[in-house]
Every structure is written in structure tokens, then in C-alpha cells.
Amino acid sequence: MATFAPPRPGPMTPGARPPAAARREAWQRRLPLTPALLFMIFVTQIPFVFTVIFSFQSWNLVRPGSQHWVGLGNYANVFTDSAFRGALFTEIEMTVLAVAISMVLGIGLAVLLDRKFPGRGIVRTLLIAPFLVMPTVAGLLWKTTMLDPVYGIVNYLLRLVGVAPVDFVSRFPMASIVTVLVWQWTPFMMLIVLAGLQSQSGEVLEAARVDGAGPWTTFRAITVPHLRPYIELGGLLGAIYLVNTFDVIFMTTQGGPGTATTNLPYYLYQRAFLGFDVGQASALGVVTVIGTIAVASVALRMLFTVFSTTEGRA
Amino acid sequence: MAEVRYEQASRIYPGTPPVMAVDRLDLAIADGEFLVLVGPSGSGKTTALRMLAGLEEIDSGRISIGDRDVTHAPPKERDIAMVFQSYALYPHMTVAQNMGFALNLRGVSKETIAEKVTEAARLLDLDKYLDRKPKALSGGQRQRVAMGRAIVREPSVFLMDEPLSNLDAKLRVETRANIAALQARLGTTTVYVTHDQVEAMTMGHRVAVLKDGVLQQCDTPRTLYERPANAFVAGFIGSPAMNLHTVPVSENGAQLGELTLPLPRATTANLTEVTLGIRPETLRLVGPEEAGFKLAVELVEELGADAYLHGRAHLGDSDQRFVLRVDGRTPPTIGQTVNAGLRDTGEIHLFHPGTGERLD
Ligand SMILES: Nc1ncnc2c1ncn2[C@@H]1O[C@H](COP(=O)(O)OP(=O)(O)OP(=O)(O)O)[C@@H](O)[C@H]1O
Ligand SMILES: [Mg+2]
């Protein structure tokens, strides 16, 4: 019935509402969200504020009473600390290798899964499984059942072909960690690339066939450009997760041997919970957080351009 | 330049029950001919075209292009170019790259490609858009790029699957004429699929009508219109559709209300009924004193010059619908009862009531 009422002029249109009423309504909408917001602030921001405060102090838990203000001293140490720089490079190496290798494998598997064959559903489920395993469990699993020099499956297989057992975790620590990460993250890359492959228009592929392109040319000239946003998306998401790798390192190499597999999160942990150097560890943490925010915002901006170009495609 | 032959070519999609999408198709298309495949949805037009393109397996029979048997040849060895319904442009390539892609794969030199692309672009009025991506083009422009991509290759056969169905009505009429003119100019054998019988009639040198994967008739548009081979073709070709009604046969001929239509005895021998096919323009309004049948007007479609009158007649013991063309200036009004007669009894088509085959 309202449809037949004559349109009332002027002040009732939403744009022209008095600002106080608009503000009140906006707050009414936000109100249900505030408990969650307060909780978030309480559990994340308050500890961060403490971290910032500690980072200006020299404070080692092993020496009670040593707590005193040192201004920016801890920060100066961060930038002269060669172990920190080493951890940073380890971190970059580990992340880049894991993302790149899992992406290449993921693309390969996605291409294989993109065709129909009997048992495809089961194969897909099995391939996804490693992604569902907790990183801690994955680390333990690889360290023991797979790579152990005495009873590991890999060494058992090597023995069958006459190769002496290898202690992978201490001989090739970086390769071992990257293997575990790749094993976990290949399914993720595969899923994202598979979504890309399945969103590809069949007619475009047929047009390429009619135009004379073989399977490899079609893949290179048509499919890869189509997949690019998906590959970027998978790479970014994977990298954002993998820079935080801690559990796998903790379970397998403990950052070693030496500092061969000590990345930033693990180095932080060592300084705070093994060295009990609260002040220095806090400064490290603050620097890491600022760096991560910088990298993440660049990554997120890229991500949004990925989405907007995907949307605009014909 | 090549002729195309389908010889008993079939495509069966596996399933329970298997779908005979194209059923023993026999069709010979002359060099330079524009052949239109037409039929209702699901009649196997696309499948027949894709068999020729090599995108669909041929389960039995043969297909040849020129002198070559291409039954099992992959698409790239058939020297064909295809225009898809969705155009299937390569989204990340510019218009020029889209058009040059096939030549590029063949290893043609950059200069030759640029030359041919420019020439085709001029022909299709695409010069201004060569550097754009497909997403920055209108539907009509995309359609032209798809055409350009086919032309540039100078193939021996063009295949087109409903290339106009995504265009608006006005553009479709315009593009229809352009494609026909272009084909006449290039003289390339063309197989064109459409479900629109107006397109079929206006564009094709010959038109092949398919139904359920079976070829019903393949002939010139005029012959299809004047001598449809069966009731299906009669009903499919022409707009609005032909009036098809099965009526009893008496001593003197077929009985249409009070109207008796003399029938050639030989054709209706030992039939008690016959299917009459009467085009809307064969019917006309007559005065109450003339022979005709009564029609209750249900709907009048006014198209300007003409109007189509949809009415219901009581024939025998059932109601039957008729459409007739009347003068657009003085159409009857809904609810009126009019008297309908025939313009010329020679224009009536007779079909077998059971099989639908033409009876003369
Ligand atoms: N991949 C497939 N698997 C099984 N049946 C199919 C497949 N593709 C097509 N068909 C069937 O084959 C028949 C012919 O299909 P086709 O696409 O050739 O029809 P069409 O004449 O092009 O129709 P339209 O005008 O709607 O495009 C239809 O009955 C369809 O259901
Ligand atoms: Mg079709």
C-alpha cells in the first residue's frame, strides 16, 4: 500500500537526515560488534603495548633486579645484531623456496586433476590431506617416520637401493624444513590453481585448438596468463603464512644445527624464552611486527589489484 | 577453398540411454557455398559443426574437406576457422594479437601478420581497436574481432556457431547482411549454425534443417518455403508458423469447416485423414456469403503494414487454432467472429497424417 503514497518531499530522504540521528543509527549498528572489538583490543593490543614498553628496558629474567630503562639501546642492538640478520635471510630463503616449489608442484597436480579419470574424487581428497594436518604433527611425522636415520621410511628405501643411511635433519636441515613446508602447502596451491583452471572457458581452449595450438602452446599462451592472478593470490597467501613458520622448525631442527634453520619467529623465541632477555626480545618483536606490517600491506594491496583485475576480465 | 562432405556421419554421446546427437548425416557442401544448419534447440546443429571442426569425435561415418578424409584428424590439420557463440576471444591478448595468434603459431613473419591483421581490421572497421583488450570492447565489436580472427587465417572453411545470438536485434540484422556480403566477397565455403529461421532464410545459399539429429531437408530457402519435405520443416520454416491441422478426407476432398478443398485423388488414396498445411498469408478474411470457416478472434498482433490474427475455429468436434495475415490498417478486434477463406487452393501443402511426409 505504501507504494501508492505520494512521495514526500525533502527532509525524509536518507542523505538529508540530521547528522546526530545518523550518528546514533551508526552506533546502533556497531553496538553488537563492540564486545568482539574490545576483546580483540584486550588480547592483542594490550600485550603489544607492554612489548613496546619492555623494548625500552634492559631486563633479563635470569638476573632479578636488572630491569632499567635504556631508551633506544635495544633497537640499536637489533640492527647491529648479525644473528638477527642471519635469521632474516634464513626466513626469506625458507619462505621463497617453500612457496616457489609448492607452487610449481601445485600447478602440476592441478593440471593433472583438471581432467576426468576414475577415482578423481578420492585422489583429490588424498592430495588435500597434508594441508589439514597440524604443522606440529607434520614436523614430528617427517622427523620420525620419514627422515629418521634409523627407522625412517626414506632411509629404508635408500637402503634398498644400496645407499647408506643419511641423517637428513642434521645434514640437510634447510632442505628438510622446506620439504615439510612444501608437503603441507602444495595442496593449498593446487586447490587455488585448480579453481583457476576450472574457471577457464572451454570455448577459449577450443578456439586455440582450432587456431592450431598444441597442448603445450595452449597451456603456455592461454592458460598461464589466465592463471596469473590465481598464482599471485596463492603465492601471497602462502608467503603470509609461511613467514610465521615456527612449529615445524621447533619440532624438527630446533633452529639448528647452529643457526642453519633459525628464522625470525624462532630467533625471537630463543631470545625471549631461552635467553630470558625480555627487553632485547621485545625490541626484536617490535621491529619484526613493523616489518611484517610493511610487507603485508604491500602484499595486500597487490592482492586487491589481483581481485579487481580478475573481476574486470571479459 | 574446399567442398565439405558428411557421409553417414554420426555422433553418439555415451549415457543411459546414449544420445544420438547427430544421426547418419549425409550432406555435401559445394566449394564456396554458404550452408546454414538450422533446427530447434537440441537438434544437433552444434554437434554437427563441432564434428566438422574436429572438436567432437565421429562415432561412425566419414567427413571430408576437399579431397582429404579428416574423420580422425585433429582440428589444427583441417584448415578451418571457427567463430564461437561466446566469441571465445583470448582475454589477455589485444585485438591484434587475437587476430594474429593462428598465423603466429604457423611461424608467419611479423610483417606479414601485421599486414594481414591491418587488412582484416579495415574490412571489419576495427582499425581503432587493434590495441584494446576484448573486455574493453562492445558486444558487436567482439563479434567482429571473432570474425576477423577467422578471416585472417584464410582457411578453406568457415564454421560459425550462432555468432549473432548475443547481439541486439538491430545489430543482428546489420551484421547478418555484413557476414553474407563478406562471405560472398571471400568466396570461402561456410557452414553457419543458427536456430533463427529468418537468419537461415536470408543468409544461406542452401539451408539444412535438422531435427533430433536427423537431416530433414536441405535445399534453397525458396524451395524449403514452397515445397517443405515434411510437416516438421513446414512448421519450422516461416514466421509465424504454418497452420498445420489434420482434417478428415471426404469424397470431394479435405473438409475444413464448411470449406471443401478438392484434393488430387492420387495423393490421398486410401487415407481417411490428411494434414493440411496453410501459411498465414494463404488465408484471408472473406465476406459472410463466401465459402469459409468461422474463426473467433483471440489475439491481433499489429506489425504496422500487416497484422497477424490468431483465432480459434470449431472444426469437426474440436477447437483448432489458426493464424492468418490481415491488412494492418483495418484488423478485426478481439472477440469478433470472422469468416476465413483461402487466397489460392494451390498454395496448400498436404502431409501424411502419420509420418508427416509430403504427399505430392
Ligand atoms: N556432452 C554431451 N553429453 C551428452 N549429451 C550431449 C552433450 N552435448 C550435447 N548433448 C546432446 O546432444 C543433442 C544435440 O546437442 P547440440 O548442442 O548439438 O544441440 P543444438 O542443436 O546446438 O542446440 P542449441 O540450439 O540449443 O544450441 C542434445 O540433445 C544434447 O542434449
Ligand atoms: Mg548449439
Image (spheres, coloured by chain):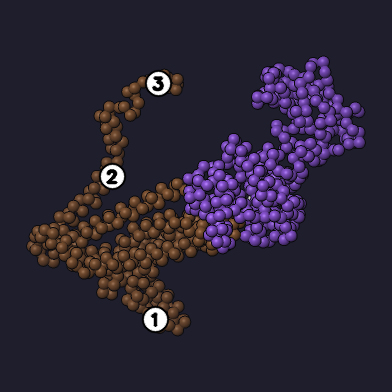
Chain colours: A brown, B purple
Residue B258 percent across, percent down from the top left = 83, 22
What residue appears at the point 9 percent right and 63 percent down from the top-left corner? A66
Residue B223 percent across, percent down from the top left = 78, 39
What residue appears at the point 17 percent right and 55 percent down from the top-left corner? A52
Q: Label 2 vs label 1: CA separation?
A: 53 Å
Q: Is residue B69 above or below residue B227?
A: below
Numbered badge on residue A36: 2
* Badge 2 element: helix
- Give the mark nearest the N terminus, 3 or 2: 3
Q: Is residue B57 above or below residue A161?
A: above
Left/right of residue A232 with respect to residue B267 in the rendered view: left
- Disc 3: which residue: A7
B103 or B338: nearer the viewer: B103
Q: Label 3 vs label 1: CA separation?
A: 86 Å
Indicate yes or no: mark 1 CB to ligand 1 under 8 Å.
Answer: no
- Give the mark nearest the N terminus, 3 or 1: 3
Residue B181 percent across, percent down from the top left = 66, 43
Q: Label 3 vs label 2: CA separation?
A: 41 Å
Disc 3 crowd rating (10 Å Cα; few below 14, some 14-19, many 20+) is: few
Numbered badge on residue A165: 1
Q: Is residue A172 above or below residue B334?
A: below
Nearest to viewer (mark 3 / mark 1): 3
Left/right of residue B304 with respect to residue A34 in the rendered view: right
Chain containing mark 3: A
Mark 3: which amino acid?
Answer: Pro
Disc 2 crowd rating (10 Å Cα; few below 14, some 14-19, many 20+) is: few
